[in-house]
Amino acid sequence: MELQIYIVMECLKHRFNQGKEGNVYFYRDSNGQEVDILVKEEGQLTAIEVKSSMTYHPDFAKSLKRLPEWTSTPIKRRAVVYGGDFENTAGDIWLLKYNHIEQSFN
């Protein structure tokens, strides 16, 4: 849970340092489907799933892959941020180390 709080705070800090409003949200529907962080900017979403694991598992991106089914808002970027060291992309989903969260917004 601490990593999730840290990542949300880093998202907010990054936005405020750029003079932008927070616009950081959480998504959860009545079926329990959720995305940890949604940042809305210029009519588009950046979606971030946060995992504290040191080892990546493909299920981490499950909700990010389904997000287009849940919203009509265009999705600019999707990322899994986790505690491990490996970084990569899988299609249009980024895998980032937790201390590189700012790359989600560039």
Image (cartoon, rainbow, N blue to C red):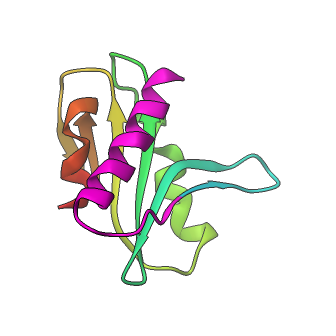
Q: In the visual, does 94 lie left or right of 59?
A: left
Residue depicted at x 41% and y 49%:
48
Numbered-mark total: 0
In magenta segment, residue 99: no
Quadrant of the image occupied by residue 57: top left
* Position of residue 34 measured from the top left corner of the image (x, y, whole percent): 63, 49
Highlighted magenta segment, given as a residue range: 1-24
* Position of residue 26 measured from the top left corner of the image (x, y, whole percent): 59, 53
Residue depicted at x 26% and y 20%:
84
Q: Nearer the viewer, residue 75 or 20?
A: 20
Residue depicted at x 42% and y 83%:
43
Q: Quadrant of the C terminus?
A: bottom left
Residue depicted at x 44% and y 62%:
22
Measured along the vertical axis of the image, is residue 35 above or below residue 69? above
Measured along the vertical axis of the image, is residue 63 above or below residue 66? above
Taken as a whole, is the magenta stretch helix, strand or loop? helix
Q: Quadrant of the N terminus?
A: top right
* Position of residue 91 measured from the top left corner of the image (x, y, whole percent): 26, 55
* Position of residue 79 measured from the top left corner of the image (x, y, whole percent): 33, 49
In magenta segment, residue 17: yes
Could one spot residue 92 in this view of the protein? no
Measured along the vertical axis of the image, is residue 57 above or below residue 40? above
Quadrant of the image occupied by residue 29: bottom right
Q: Nearer the viewer, residue 6 or 60?
A: 6
Could one spot residue 70 in this view of the protein? yes
Q: Residue furthest top?
A: 54
Measured along the vertical axis of the image, is residue 16 above or below residue 51? below
Q: In the visual, does 10 lie left or right of 52?
A: left
